Amino acid sequence: MKRRTYLQTLLAAGAGSAIVRSASANPPVVVAGDLTIDPEKEEGLLKTFRNDFWPAAAKQPGFIDMKMLKVRPRANAPAGGPTHRFVLSFQSEELRLKWVATDDHKRLWPVMQSAFKSSSFTSFDDVTQA
């Protein structure tokens, strides 16, 4: 009989379900932005994002994830649409706002914004992992 393995599996499953319950009780906040980036500034933006902005945000309490995604236009998409999507996830809006108030954010966000031709941001505070 493999009672020990069975009990370990049962305990692990119970711990996992407790984590899922606690995560769904307080869903994270996600901010998504559709960005149109000046092609001449794209390389500098991505370098700043990877080397400075992401590492500074990752050190903040409540940080979950941050991505800069390249939008691949469809063949029938209108010209001038967004070229990138920025997605930021924090455990709460309060913790996200603390990040926004940091000296690192105040120093780095204008550098990021200088590459934007246009931007449109949406905040979601009721998301859960599917």
Image (cartoon, grey):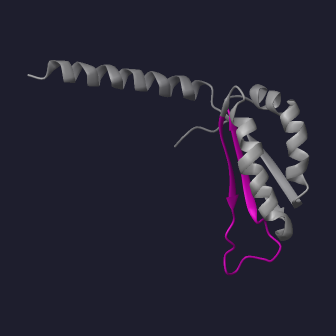
Q: Is residue 125 visible?
A: no
Q: Residue at x 77, y 32 (%)?
A: 96
In x, y percent, where is residue 45?
80, 57
51 left or right of 101 in image: left
Q: Is residue 114 above or below residue 94?
A: below
In x, y percent, where is residue 3?
15, 19
In x, y percent, where is residue 63?
68, 32
Q: Is residue 38 above or below residue 126?
A: below
- Residue nearer the viewer, 17 or 72: 72
Q: Is residue 70 visible?
A: yes
Q: Quadrant of residue 43?
A: bottom right
Q: Residue at x 90, y 37 (%)?
A: 106
Q: Residue at x 75, y 27 (%)?
A: 95
Q: Is residue 35 above or below residue 21?
A: below
Q: Quadrant of residue 53?
A: top right
Residues in magenta? 64-90
Q: Residue at x 49, y 28 (%)?
A: 20
